[in-house]
Amino acid sequence: MFSNLDNIRPALKSLVAALREDYPYASVLAVEDAWRRWSVSRQGVSIDASGFGGGTGFVVRVFDGVGCAEYSFNQFSEERIPKIKALISERLAAQNKALGDIDPLPTPLPADEPAALSKRCDYKLDPRELGDEAIIQKLSSIREKALKLDERIMESQLGMAHRAYRKVFISGNRDLDQTYMWTTCSLAMMVSRGQELKYSYQGFSNLGGAEVLDQVESGLEAVARTALDLLDSQPIPPGEYDCVCDPDTTGMIVHEAFGHGVEMDMFVKDRALGREYIDKYVASGLVTMHDGSTVQEAATMAFDDEGTLTGDTVVIDRGVLKTGMCDALSAARLGVKPTGNGRRESYERKAYTRMTNTYFEAGEHSMEEMISSIKYGFLLQQPSSGMEDPKNWGIQCMVSIAREIKDGRLTGKVFSPIVLTGYVPDLLKSVSMMGRDMKLAGGGFCGKGYKEWVKVSDGGPCMKARIRLG
């Protein structure tokens, strides 16, 4: 799989060696990937081979002691090395000239410690080997099963997306090679009663192949039940309540509350309040937050797009904000070590600090214990979207369903839709119980602002907290 990079690997090493004749640091990232998306619905069948990933290409980066310059391209051979050197030289000269009398940001050279690795992820069913016909047939079969669950189900839509990629990173002291794939599925059901229509959705993901379809089949009844429950839903009285968050809702809070807020390129620009709270309490002592690749989900990788090896970053340790997540360029300017979070939407795009697999650590309680501890409150399920303000630590998220809890029991009463708001430290300091079972999901993408989309996953255990709902 992806053998083309093997053929040009010697030329890539020659490119880095040639650039290092002129610059104290040089690197090249080579990417080869395949992307495909399938969907079935009442409107028919769709197969899409365009979209996320960007295809095969290369990006060169050099540091000259003053600044950093990059050049991306999608055709390469050893004969093109002099042209690439000339283009890089022109870009750096223009960049430094444009500064005029402005002092550049201090940008030390990347450490570039020696490292070599070759890593591949495991999978059971490669969608490319399975083929379009078999995948569409399987999706259609699952859709038909969904439609037969209840006469009130008007429509069921299923989608599956897959990306397999290989990345090779070469610098003066690094020779890194990784091949990964992720596959995600989406299941949506629309139900009706008279003129009333309701909708329920669930995503499924794995670091692997089409074996994720087994998860979809096992989730049919839960999605149908939620959609039907929503037919009896009503607006929630605004207020602050004791809440139990399911793992998906916990994941949304992780991602929005202290995910974007501790992406450290925002520290460089003084756009994140988190910079002022390192080594201070920002959450309950029950809260420990991680980001990294020690878990196996859709955003797992062995190294990031700047050649930094990934691992486990403990962002919050028992309530104390310890560090943020950092790309190599921001780390150099801040005087800290990069954490392996420098990610590009494609080889044509800049590397930004981005989350990978972000989650809260498990605790010691069950969901049943949390529910039984609540006099009056809600079980929150099925998050749909969220956003935060890293400068002021405000959060606003959408949740599809809140199930009423009264005297420690679910009453069967349902409220929808739900807006979850608040000041991030207030929410996290109110956490009073953490579940013992942890779950991550990687069905979605994350943008930097409104663009620069990358695959992420998030999650954690069930969580009890005091939350403002409306």
Image: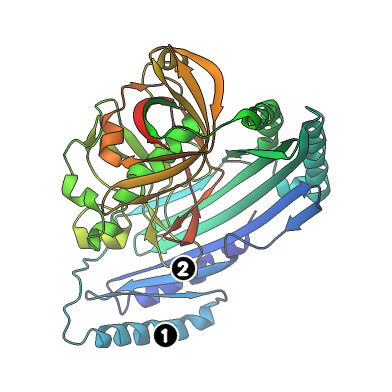
Q: In which quadrant of the rendered image does the C terminus lie?
A: top left
Q: Amino acid at mark 2?
A: Arg
Residue at disc 2, secondary structure:
loop
Q: Residues within 10 Å of mark 1 (few under 14, many from 20)?
A: some
How far apart, in angstroms, are the residues tagged by discs 2 and 1?
17 Å
Give me the residue at 33% from left, 35% from top. Answer: 289
Q: How many numbered marks, from 0 up?
A: 2
Q: Residue at x 22, y 63 (%)?
A: 333
Label 1 belongs to which residue? 87
Residue 34 visible (yes or no): yes
Could you tell which of marks 2 and 1 lies nearer the N-terminus?
1
Q: Which mark is residue 349?
A: 2
Circle nearer the viewer, 2 or 1: 2
Indicate the secondary structure of the residue bearing disc 1: helix
x 22%, y 37%: residue: 282
Give x and y (percent) for residue 240: 35, 31
Instruction: For residue 124, say whether it is visible.
Output: no
Q: How is the image coloured?
A: rainbow
Would you place residue 167 above or below residue 444 in this image?
below
Give the residue at x 58% y 61%.
32
